[in-house]
Image (cartoon, rainbow, N blue to C red):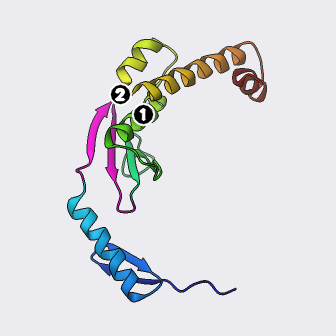
Amino acid sequence: MRKPKTVTTSRGCVVGEGPNKNEAKLDLSNKIDFLCNAQAPHIEFRWGLTLIVAASPVGEWCYQIIEPGKATEHHGKTLWMNGLGSRPMTMSDAISKVRMFAAQSAWEPRRDDELFVFASACKEAEAAELRSWVKWQRSYAKHKLDGKTDAEAHQLASGF
């Protein structure tokens, strides 16, 4: 079966796509309108990480977490980038999710769990998920100290 033809058109580095020229132009126009009217990206610094949250032209929230000082990638920075999906979500919800991801990256066993969750400034749903994640990490570490293999510790920490 033949793949449907896709027509592309662009202006600068913004690309519009569609099954025909008119649809591609309409897609390009919509993306340009979005970029002209989009909410400004949110940038914050937490635990030595730079968190950036922005809306994309396709209606998804995207984020980047930049960790300076890592000389192996991206000109001395470790960079994580992902989309948060297209389910309806406010900028505030997206920021809370990204704060949770950054907290998971920055967590260390020597930290006080509740102070750490509080410092993450996540909304309650993400704070609960972060607490659960920390509990799992501690359980896994305990099983590893007890001499379990990685697989056994993972199963025991997961409750299997």
Residue 56 image point, x, y percent? 35, 58
Kindly identify the residue that appears in the image at 41 percent across and 54 percent down. 60
The answer, for residue 112, to whether it is visible in the render is yes
Q: Nearer the viewer, residue 152 or 99?
A: 99
Q: Quadrant of the N terminus?
A: bottom right
Residue 80 image point, x, y percent? 44, 46
Is residue 14 positioned above or below 60 on the image? below
Q: Residues within 10 Å of mark 1 (few under 14, many from 20)?
A: many
Discs 2, 1 touching: Cβ within 8 Å = yes
Q: Nearer the viewer, residue 83 or 151?
A: 83
Q: Is residue 33 left or right of residue 142?
A: left
Q: Callout 2, which amino acid?
A: Trp
Is residue 98 positioned above or below 143 on the image? below
Q: Residues within 10 Å of mark 2 (few under 14, many from 20)?
A: few
Q: Callout 1, which amino acid?
A: Ala
Q: Quadrant of the C terminus?
A: top right
Q: Is residue 14 left or right of residue 17?
A: left
Q: Which residue is mark 2?
A: 47
Q: Is residue 137 magenta?
A: no
Q: Main secondary structure of the magenta part?
A: strand
Query: Of the residues tagged 2 and 1, which is closer to the observer?
Result: 1
Q: Nearer the viewer, residue 86 or 158?
A: 86
Q: Name the secondary structure under disc 2.
A: loop
Q: Name the secondary structure under disc 1.
A: helix
Which residues are the magenta region? 39-58
Residue 149 image point, x, y percent? 77, 25
Asked which quadrant contains residue 23, the reply is bottom left
Q: Is residue 56 magenta?
A: yes
Numbered mark located on residue 102 in the image: 1
Q: How far is disc 2 from disc 1 in space, using C-alphas?
A: 8 Å
Query: In the image as oriented, which residue stretches furthest toward the front?
Result: 88
